[in-house]
Amino acid sequence: MFVDLSNKKIGFLGIVVLALLVVTVSTFLIAASARPAMHAFTDSAQRARAELYYLVRFKLPEAALAAVTGSSRTEAQSATSSVVSARSVPVLLYHGEGDSTSMPPMRVFVEHMRALRDAGWHTITMEQFKAFMEGTGTVPDKSFLLTFDDGRSDALYSADPLLKDFGYTAVMFVITGFSMPGNGDVPLNDFYLSKSQLDYMVKSGRWDLESHGDQDHLTYSVPIATSTAQDLTLVPGQHFLSNFFWLPDAGRIETPAEFVTRVTNDLTAAKTLLENNFDIVVDGFAYPLNDLGQDSINAPQADTLLSRVVPTIYPFDFYQTWPGNGDFFNHPDPDVHLIKRIEPTASWSSSHLLEVLNGGVVKSLPHTAFTFGPAWKSNWGTVRPDDTGLELSASKDSTGASAFLDGSGTWTDYKMNASAEWKYGTFSLLARYTAQYAPYVVCAFSNNRIYLERHDGEKLETIAYKPYAPPALPAKADFSMSVQGDTASCSAYGVRVAGSVAGISRSGGVGATVWTPSAGEAQAILTRLAVESL
């Protein structure tokens, strides 16, 4: 037995191998060229399956229940509809098919939308939202903007049948680098929407496409602030928008100007890709990972730089808000670029979502409260609103508690009269509160002095103070506070403290705080609050 390696056989084997190689490469090229068409066919099949699933899982049971109970969704909607124009608009954020611990699964999303629909809430388009914010158009009361992040294909399959059924619209924030890498037709993987899917969404009339950036969802290794070419330390897994990069050719960290150029190029690329491919206007950008520059490890000025450059590309810049950050809703103002979004979690019941939205509606003056509901949001500490009062108390690990009245952020000049069961600590009233890190006015009532203060993040400035003689604690106590222009005053038990407070917003909401230097001691119950215009 031996191997025949004659020239004729070697030549024949070479021809066979070459032929197989040609066939293999040709097959690969044909498959690659056909992949967009195959992807489009698969997408059509998945959309059909999603619509059938929605029909069987949600639509038919709802119709059967309506037939049994005799209820009519159309009648319920018309009964709650109104010709009144909205004074503020909430923006809701979902992502795609979630699980039971974080992002809502389809079942919860459908329950949320049904509850909103039955309560008279309805969606608006991005164009309508833009006109509302710029003051060039109005939208009906109980309008909301429904948004989805990341350009996920499961969001399309989960939400689109419901949008069609309810007559709703939505906004999808697309990561162009993942959905259309290299401006191609095929996404990075099937988790992301393809160009053909995005085209279907635009043509359906139910979806607006906005930007979630191009390459800014990837994570990067960035240098610590003190890095040099001789002593370089890179930290992996960091965000694109909040850090200076290392420039290997130059052997140094990016300058602020180079950072701005890199960010501008990325955001402009995403906007251009979307506008050119789908013949649309892109006005919105959603900050990736809700990082507005605050998560930087080497560029403490990143948030300031982003606040300057992003609005020059996108008029509306969306982020997820949180309790303690002022009103949940967005108020019309042509000078506002940052747009707040509310992100329901899987644990939110439909009734809780309605409580949040109903609580965020703009409050009118005069406003008097003897009972305190979900509109009172915790800034920090333990806050318990109920029919008897607003309890503010320190936990064993906190020095106090603070609450804000959601929907009061549009108030300008006003006077507050408050009553409280004052148990322990310094009790304070807050005015012109707009956001967690924006300046506002505080009237602080201790056991022997009244302080007029300006708070700005963690900075506190005492404007004026006077001694006074309040009752010994615990006691029922009354306090007053007023703001007009940049002048504020605090009053209690015959003593008034007043002064000018610079740099505060022309409008802003109200709140209350109780505080002591030691943890676990402060406690008060706000039992009455009356606010009137000045």
Image: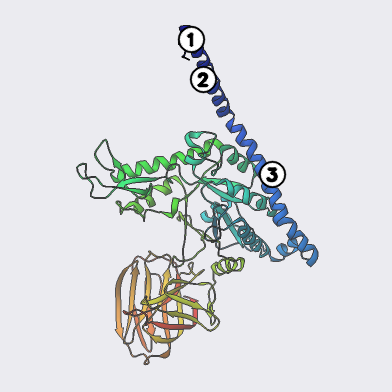
Mark 2, residue position: 21
Give the alpha-carbon distance from disc 1 to disc 2, as whole Å: 15 Å
Relative depth, front residue between 95 and 293: 95
Disc 3 element:
helix
Mark 1, residue position: 11
Nearer the viewer's eye, disc 1 or disc 2? 1
Give the alpha-carbon distance from disc 1 to disc 3, as whole Å: 54 Å
Kind of residue sitting beneath label 2: Leu
Residue at 30% x, 83% y: name it. Answer: 466
Q: Is residue 156 left or right of residue 226?
A: right
Q: Are marks 1 and 3 in contact (CB under 8 Å)?
A: no
- Which quarter of the picture shows residue 430? bottom left
* Residue farthest left in this picture: 230
Mark 3, residue position: 48
Residue at 46% x, 14% y: name it. Answer: 3
Question: Upstream in the sequence, badge 1 or badge 3?
Answer: 1
Percent position of residue 38, x then y? 62, 33
Give the alpha-carbon distance from disc 2 to disc 3, as whole Å: 39 Å
Residue at 63% x, 38% y: name it. Answer: 42
Q: Are marks 1 and 2 in contact (CB under 8 Å)?
A: no
Percent position of residue 303, x then y? 36, 54
Kind of residue sitting beneath label 3: Ala
Kind of residue sitting beneath label 1: Gly
Relative depth, front residue between 123 and 519: 519
Nearer the viewer's eye, disc 2 or disc 3? 2
User: Visible in this render: residue 500?
Assistant: no
Percent position of residue 406, x then y? 50, 69
Disc 2 element:
helix
Q: Is residue 167 left or right of residue 209?
A: right
Q: Residues within 10 Å of mark 3 (few under 14, many from 20)?
A: some
310 is higher (above) or lower (below) than 9:
below
